């Protein structure tokens, strides 16, 4: 199966490499074209525009930073819409809101193409290992056609029905994750400031009912105040913002998510947006050196 791939950031690169390793032919494009070099060394082809990728491939996957990037790659000059047509499928794995997914879907359908939104849960390492959770919605026939690729990309795919449901599910999951990260961070500081050993807190948490892979993975680096980006903080804040907007639309009060969003915004204002989202830890006053 020949797959086009648009967007070679942390996730797009890991997914494309994984597809190549499993024998898929992959043609890539990235806004900063120089980032395609590493993929070419691994056997990928490269094209100079999203339109050229879509022209070449029956199926094209996108993995882009946010709604504005996802829209730009479809609608701008040299974009997906210029070449999408009957018999071609476009699969957007970016985390966006339901309105953005619907706008893209309508435009692709108007040109005779097929559309699937397929945001993913899981970060850099699960992407490298083909262990993502895929939250697909839209054209069910296209979903079935691309299952061989989804089986390589993820450990489980969900088909969630109409376009928008994938985006909503992803935003709900990341709203919970962002809130958890803030509670975890406060707990690490509280343990430290009250005279406990944070590493022992991690051991206790890991044996109890709230043990989870995120605490296990991020805890040690947070204690060391090191935040190499797996999931950039600016994207987590974007997801909190979009989840809060979904809450507004549905009159769902989310005070905990709102507070978490403020913490991520504060982290961005401190210049931490490109670090891992666990860097929200640095916003806590207690971590700052005394004056
Ligand atoms: N990292 C993670 O753990 C996870 C991320 N996600 C989601 O996946 C998506 C990608 O995340 P990630 O790979 O981490 O992000 P990165 O910031 O590493 O990569 C973003 C990608 O989007 C491209 N891009 C940004 N703006 C534009 C634009 N205006 N036009 C065209 N391309 C653009 C970038 O191109 P360029 O190289 O030129 O800047 C790059 O290829 C996001 O929606 C994120 O929320 C979902 C699950 C996990
Ligand atoms: O969107 C991020 C993730 O870890 O999932």
Image (cartoon, rainbow, N blue to C red):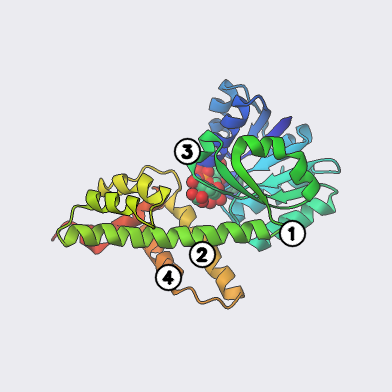
Which residue corresponds to the image point at 45% horizontal and 54% vertical from the top-left? 234
How far is disc 3 from disc 2 in space, using C-alphas? 25 Å
Mark 3: few, some, or many residues within 10 Å (few <14, many ≥20)? Answer: some
Q: Of discs 3 and 2, which sits in the foreground? A: 3
How far is disc 2 from disc 1 in space, using C-alphas? 23 Å
Residue 59 picture location, percent across and down: 74, 38
Q: Is residue 271 visible?
A: no
Q: Of discs 4 and 2, which sits in the foreground? A: 4
- As displayed, is residue 272 above or below residue 38? below
Residue linked to disc 4 = 256
Residue 143 picture location, percent across and down: 74, 45
How far is disc 1 from disc 4 in space, using C-alphas? 29 Å
Q: Quadrant of the C terminus?
A: bottom left
Residue linked to disc 1 = 162
Earlier-in-chain disc, 4 versus 2: 2
Q: Quadrant of the N terminus?
A: top right
Residue 152 picture location, percent across and down: 62, 34
């Amino acid at each position: 199966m020949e797959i086009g791939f648009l967007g070679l950031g942390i996730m797009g690169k890991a997914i494309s490499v994984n597809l190549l390793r499993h024998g898929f032919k992959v043609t890539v494009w990235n806004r900063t074209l120089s980032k395609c070099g590493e993929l070419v060394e691994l056997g990928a082809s490269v094209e100079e525009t999203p339109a050229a990728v879509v022209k070449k491939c029956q199926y094209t996957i996108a993995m882009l930073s946010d709604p504005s990037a996802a829209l730009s790659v479809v609608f701008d000059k040299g974009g997906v819409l210029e070449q999408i047509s009957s018999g071609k499928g476009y699969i957007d794995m970016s985390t966006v809101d339901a309105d953005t997914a619907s706008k893209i879907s309508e435009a692709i359908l108007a040109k005779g193409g097929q559309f699937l939104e397929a945001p993913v849960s899981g970060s850099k390492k699960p992407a490298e290992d083909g262990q993502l959770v895929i939250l697909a919605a839209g054209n069910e026939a296209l979903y079935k056609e691309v299952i061989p690729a989804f089986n390589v990309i993820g450990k489980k795919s969900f088909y969630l029905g109409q376009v928008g449901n994938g985006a909503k599910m992803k935003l709900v999951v990341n709203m919970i994750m962002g809130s958890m990260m803030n509670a975890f961070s406060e707990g690490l500081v509280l343990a430290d400031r009250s005279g406990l050993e944070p590493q022992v807190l991690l051991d206790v948490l890991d044996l109890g009912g709230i043990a989870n892979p995120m605490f296990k993975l991020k805890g040690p680096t947070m204690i060391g105040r090191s935040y190499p980006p797996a999931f950039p903080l600016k994207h987590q804040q974007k997801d909190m913002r979009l989840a809060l907007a979904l809450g507004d639309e549905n009159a769902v009060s989310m005070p905990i998510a709102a507070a978490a969003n403020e913490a991520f915004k504060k982290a961005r204002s401190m210049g931490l947006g490109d670090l891992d989202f666990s860097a929200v830890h640095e916003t806590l006053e207690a971590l700052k050196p005394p004056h």
